[in-house]
């Protein structure tokens, strides 16, 4: 197994590790994710029907209305949220939701996370020290 360590920018502090789930599609949290199940329900999304709960969610950025912040927060309170999130470039909706839900969030990694991290890889997010450790599976 190969390990890679990448530096990035922390937007919501904390540490988490787990299996990665990766998409090149932006995430619509308000209406595109079911907060009760943690499933992506947006029609035509690359991850439609898949569960993001207890995963390290890797995606380019969030999209949609400001209600998405509250969906991320609600998911964390219901136990259906991702363990951590990694974005190419996070926007306000995702950042606020992660902060409210105490979900570690990082962006602006030294290498493109959508190219280096694959679904199923083990990822450790240490947003306290601005580090992401990837174990290729």
Image (cartoon, grey):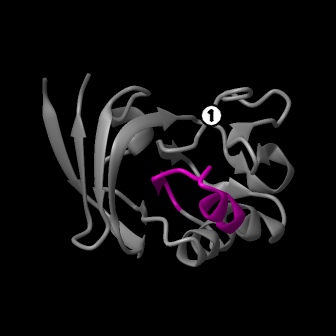
Residue 125 picture location, percent across and down: 31, 56
Instruction: Depth check: give the residue in front, 137 or 92.
Output: 137
Quadrant containing the N terminus in the rendered view: top left
* Magenta-drawn stretch contains 77: yes
Category of crowding for the residue at label 1, using alpha-carbon neighbours closer than 10 angstroms: few (below 14), some (14–19), many (at least 20)? some
Q: Which residues are magenta?
A: 73-89
Query: For the point 17% across and 40% down, which residue is it?
Result: 4
Residue under the point 75% across and 51% down: 35
Front position in the image: 11 or 52:
52
Question: Which residue does the numbered mark 1 point to in the structure image?
Answer: 51
Could you tell whether 27 is left or right of 44 in the image?
A: left
On the rendered image, what quadrant is the C terminus found in?
top left
Q: Quadrant of residue 91?
A: bottom right
Q: Would you place residue 3 above or below residue 89 in this image?
A: above
Give how far across and how far down residue 6 sits, in percent.
Answer: 22, 52
Going by the image, does 12 lie left or right of 51?
left
Expressed as whole percent of the image width and height from the top left, the position of residue 18 reads 35, 41
What residue is drawn where x is 56% and y is 48%?
Answer: 60
């Amino acid at each position: 197994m190969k390990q890679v360590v990448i530096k990035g920018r922390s937007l919501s502090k904390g540490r988490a590790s787990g299996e990665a789930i990766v998409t090149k599609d932006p995430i619509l949290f308000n209406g595109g994710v079911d907060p009760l199940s943690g499933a992506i329900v947006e029609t035509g999304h690359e991850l439609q029907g898949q569960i993001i709960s207890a995963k390290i969610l890797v995606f380019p950025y969030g999209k949609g209305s400001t209600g998405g912040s509250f969906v991320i927060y609600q998911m964390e309170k219901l136990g259906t949220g991702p363990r951590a999130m990694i974005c190419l470039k996070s926007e306000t909706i995702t950042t606020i939701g992660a902060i409210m839900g105490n979900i570690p969030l990082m962006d602006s990694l030294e290498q493109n996370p959508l190219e280096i991290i694959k679904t199923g890889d083990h990822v450790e997010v240490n947003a306290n020290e601005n580090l992401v450790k990837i174990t290729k599976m």
